[in-house]
Image (cartoon, rainbow, N blue to C red):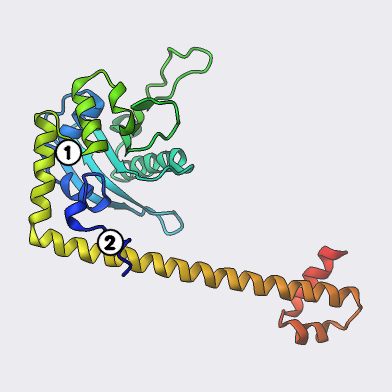
Amino acid sequence: MKNQFLKPIEDLEFTDDFMFTTAMKNEEICKGVLQTILGIKIKKIEYLESQRTFDLGYNSKGIRLDVYAEDSDKVFDVEVQNKILQEIPRRTRYYQSMIDMDQLLKGQPYTNLKDIYVIFISKSDFFAQGLPFYTFENLCNESPKLKLSDGTTKIYVNASAFSTEKNLAKKSLLCYINTKKATDNFTQNLDQTVEKIKAIEEFRGDYMSWALAEFDAKEAGKKEGLAQGIAIGETKAKLDTAKNAIKMGININQIVTLTGLSIEEIKELQQKME
């Protein structure tokens, strides 16, 4: 394994993937993070799971959520994102739809769908506006004060802008995420939880196993991508050869022998050229 891929356990932060999903298994930590970001009180988290997988159909794209939680009338998906990716807003949309489908598959009517909050936490500014929080709800273009009230909220957290946040609890959480400095009771508790997790032997073993699996998956992906690239290149070369042969009036059977393409593929190519 390449050393740069495996971050030393001692250097792990709350926002590193494996640490994040482990620390958020602690109900008090999870509840505290949600309450701080959303500015609401959560009496009790009734369901909490890290690395929750949704795969609702044979032909659908499955997803794996970092942290999935529910209380009596709300659903929370909390993701940690350490890179700015253009796909994030549409990924948020897909995550929300999969969670809604999962609820409906349980036999619930539309009116019983819980309010859903999809939260992406990052040290980077997704939208480059310098805001610590970007909260999106469905509003009417013609009357922006009119909410659709469909129970969906998407929040993108930009911890790098912690200094501009006026709410002290939110500012402390963002400061901790961005700098690892704990400045209030909750972030001190969070930091202590992170440090305790690092010392757990089982966690250390699980982290090594996870890192190896992630590394192997990335290497396999690279090889698959390379193989696909080679295959695409070979196919293009065959098609180019076939096109030239067709232009030269070479017999179709000879083109088959020359390129390895099927008669059907060559006939289709002829039709396109005509």
Q: In this view, does 65 lie above or below 158?
A: below
Q: Nearer the viewer, mark 1 or mark 2?
A: 2
Residue 39: give x, y in percent of width and height: 22, 23
**How far apart in space, not on screen, are marks 1 and 2 (Cα)?**
26 Å
Q: Image point 44% across, 66% down: which residue? A: 221
Left or right of residue 146: residue 65: left
Residue 32: give x, y in percent of width and height: 15, 32
* Residue annotated with mark 1: 30
- Of mark 1 and mark 2, the one earlier in the sequence is 2
* Residue annotated with mark 2: 6
Q: Image point 28% across, 67% down: which residue? A: 212
Based on the displayed image, in which of its 4 quarters is residue 34 positioned? top left
Kindly give the residue lying farthest to the right in the view shown. Answer: 249
Per the image, label 1 sits on a secondary structure element best described as helix
Left or right of residue 218: residue 17: left
Q: Image point 21% across, 64% down: which residue? A: 208
Q: Is residue 45 above or below residue 265?
A: above
Residue 9: give x, y in percent of width and height: 18, 57
Mark number, residue 247: none
Tell which of 57 and 154 is nearer to you. 154
Tell which of 90 and 107 is nearer to you. 90
Q: On the rendered image, what quadrant is the N terminus found in?
A: bottom left
Q: On the rendered image, what quadrant is the C terminus found in?
A: bottom right
Q: How crowded is mark 2: few (under 14 residues within 10 Å), some or many (20 or more)?
A: some
Q: Which amino acid does label 2 sit on?
A: Leu
Q: In this view, does 160 lie above or below 68?
A: above
Q: Image point 26% across, 49% down: which residue? A: 16
